[in-house]
Amino acid sequence: MERRIQRALISAYDKTGVPEFARALTDMGVEVISSGGTAHAIEQAGVPVRHVEEWTGFPEMLGHRVVTLHPKVHGGILALRDDPEHQADMETHGIEPVDLVAVGLYPFAQAIATEGCTLDDAVEMIDIGGPTLIRSAAKNHKHVTVITDPSHYNLVIDEMRANDGRVSHALRKRLARQAFATTCHYDIAITNYLARQLGEDFPERIAGSFRKACDLRYGENPHQHAAFYAGTDDAEPCIARAKLLGGREISFNNYFDANAALELVKEFTDPAVAIIKHANPAGCAVDDDIVEAYRKAYFGDVNAAMGGIIAVNRTVTPELAEAVMWTYRNWGKDRGAGGFYAEILLAPSFEPAAVELIRSTDKRWASEVRLLEVGDLHGRRNEEKALKYVVGGLLVQDRDHLGLNEDDWRVVTQAEPTEAQMADLRFAWLVCKHVKSNAIVLARDQRLLGAGAGQMSRVNSARLATEIARTYGGEERFDTTGCVLASDAFFPFPDSLDWAAEAGASAVIQPGGAKKDEDVIARADELGLAMVFTGTRHFNH
C-alpha cells in the first residue's frame, strides 16, 4: 500500500505558487521543511515551516552555498522504506524520512541571456543543492514524490486529496522522469555556455535539450508518428515560437516548409515574399510595395504555389490580405478548378483588420489556413548549430550565414554587370542559397522566374528552371531574355555557359573554384556574358 506523505522539503528560486502549495500540504497534515527565501515566503503567508538548519542541527554556510548538502537531508530522501538495513541506519542516526521534494532551480539560462552577464555571474547561478535534491528524490521515486515544475503542484495536491494523502507510483514515476529531464537540460545549458566561453565550436561531446511543443497528426507520411519539440534559445524569430492565430494544427511537413520560407525572407531587408513548396521556392520577389512583391511571387509558378507556404517580411495589412484573397478567389477559374489556397501565411505581425478579412472571406478555407505570427525579423541569431540526423549519429555544422558577403565577390569577365543586373544577381544568389542542390535560379527584376532544384545533374536543373519560367509563369508566360542565372556551385566545364545563354541569361553568378575556371571565363567572354565569382558555395541538401 502507498505511504501517506508526511514530510515535504520545498526549495524554489521562483516562489510563485509555493505558499499556496505549502498551505495545501499542511492542511493535509504534512510537515513542511524549507530554508532561506523559500521558508520566508511560506512564513509570510502564515504557513508553519520547519527550517533546514533546525532539522539538521547544522547552520547554512558559505553564503547559502551549503544548506541541504547533509546526510540527514539526503538520508531521509534516499532511504528505502522496505529495506531493514536502511531503516536501522535511519534510527541509529536520527534520520527522518522525506516523502516529497519540490525544487525550483536557479535560472541559469535566463541569467546568461541577460546583457552584461559575466562568467563570475554565471557561475554563481549554477545550482548545486537543487539538482542534488532532485536526483536523490527521482532515484528513490519508489517511495518519494519529486516536483520540478510549479504547474505540477496542483496535480500532486489533487491526487493526495483524492487518495487520503497518497501519491500513486505511476505519478511518482512520471514525475521522476520529468525530474531527470530537468537536471539534464540544466547541465546541458551549463555545458554549452562553458564551451562557448572556451571558444569550442565543436566540443568532444554535443548535447541538446528540447521541450515538447505538441503532438502532430503524423510525420512525413501518415504511417509515421510524430511530435514537435522546441529548442531553448528564444532570441531569434523562428517557427518554433511562432504564434498561431487560429486555423488547423500545423503538420510535420508544414513546420519544415514554413521554416524554409521564413529563412528565405529573412535574407531581405526590402519588402519580400516567398512561396515555398516542399522546402523549395516556388515563387519569390522583392519590391518597394509588399503587395506587388506578393503578386510577383505568386505569378512565379502559380501551379507550384498551390498548397504552399506564403512568407512575408512585413506586417500583413488589409491590402496584402486582399491580394492573397484575390488569388484564392480567382485561381483555376479558367480550368474549372477550385480556388487557390495556402497552407500557411507567415509574417512578423498581422493587423487585426487583415485577420478579419481573411477569416470572413470564405468559411471553408479561412477556417483552415494557419496564420503564423513570428515577430520582428531583425533580432539577433541564435547561437546554435545546424543538425542533420543519420542512422546512428548526427552531422553537425555551423548555420549558413545570412546575407551576401559581397566583399569576396569579383567580376571575372570583360563585361561588367550593369546596376540592374547586379541587383538581380544579388537577389538570385540569396534565393539560390535556399534551393535544394543542384540549384539553378533564373531571376529578373528581383523576381524568381524559375528554379531547378534537387536534380542529380546541374544541366537538368538549368533546363528545369528554364522550362518552369517559360511554361508556368501564370498569366505572364515569362520571356527569360535578359535574365540572370545563379548556380549554387561552380561550373565544371565551359559548355555550362552555353545552356546559361540558351536560358536567356545575360549575367551569371557562381562560386568559382573549378579546375577549368579560366576556360569557363573565356567562354563567358565569347558569349558576351557578365559573370561574378562569389568565392562561397551554398549547397542545400
Image (cartoon, grey):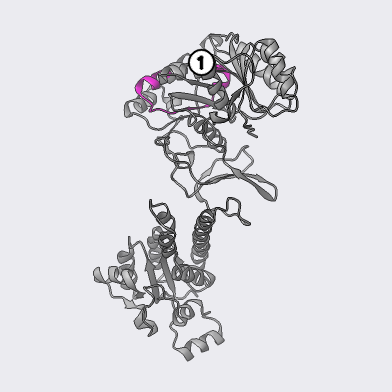
Residue 298 to residue 84: above or below: above
Please state the horizontal and vertical placement of residue 112, each as a whole percent of the image: 43, 55
Q: Quadrant of residue 270?
A: top left
Please state the horizontal and vertical placement of residue 443, each as a whole percent of the image: 57, 17
Look at 69% across and 19% down and name the residue there: 521
Which element type, helix, strand or loop, lies under badge 1? helix
Residue 413 to residue 453: above or below: above
Q: Where are the magenta residues, as a range?
A: 300-323
Residue 53 to residue 370: above or below: below
Look at 39% across and 58% down and name the residue there: 151
Residue 313 to residue 151: above or below: above
Residue furthest bottom as drawn: 92
Question: Which residue is nearer to you in this view: 162 or 258?
Answer: 258
Would you say residue 230 sits in the magenta stretch?
A: no
Please state the horizontal and vertical placement of residue 220, each as a whole percent of the image: 61, 37
Q: Quadrant of residue 335?
A: top right
- Looking at the rendered image, the quarter that the C terminus falls into is top right
**Left or right relative to 348: residue 43:** left
Residue under circle 1?
A: 419
The answer to whether one can see residue 491 in this image is yes
Please state the horizontal and vertical placement of residue 462, each as a whole percent of the image: 68, 19
**Left or right relative to 342: residue 280:** right
Question: Which residue is nearer to you in this view: 448 or 477?
Answer: 448
State how many labels appear.
1
What is the three-letter code of the residue carrying label 1? Answer: Glu
The answer to whether one can see residue 451 in this image is no
Q: Residues within 10 Å of mark 1 (few under 14, many from 20)?
A: few
Q: Quadrant of residue 301?
A: top right
Question: Which residue is nearer to you in this view: 293 or 367?
Answer: 293
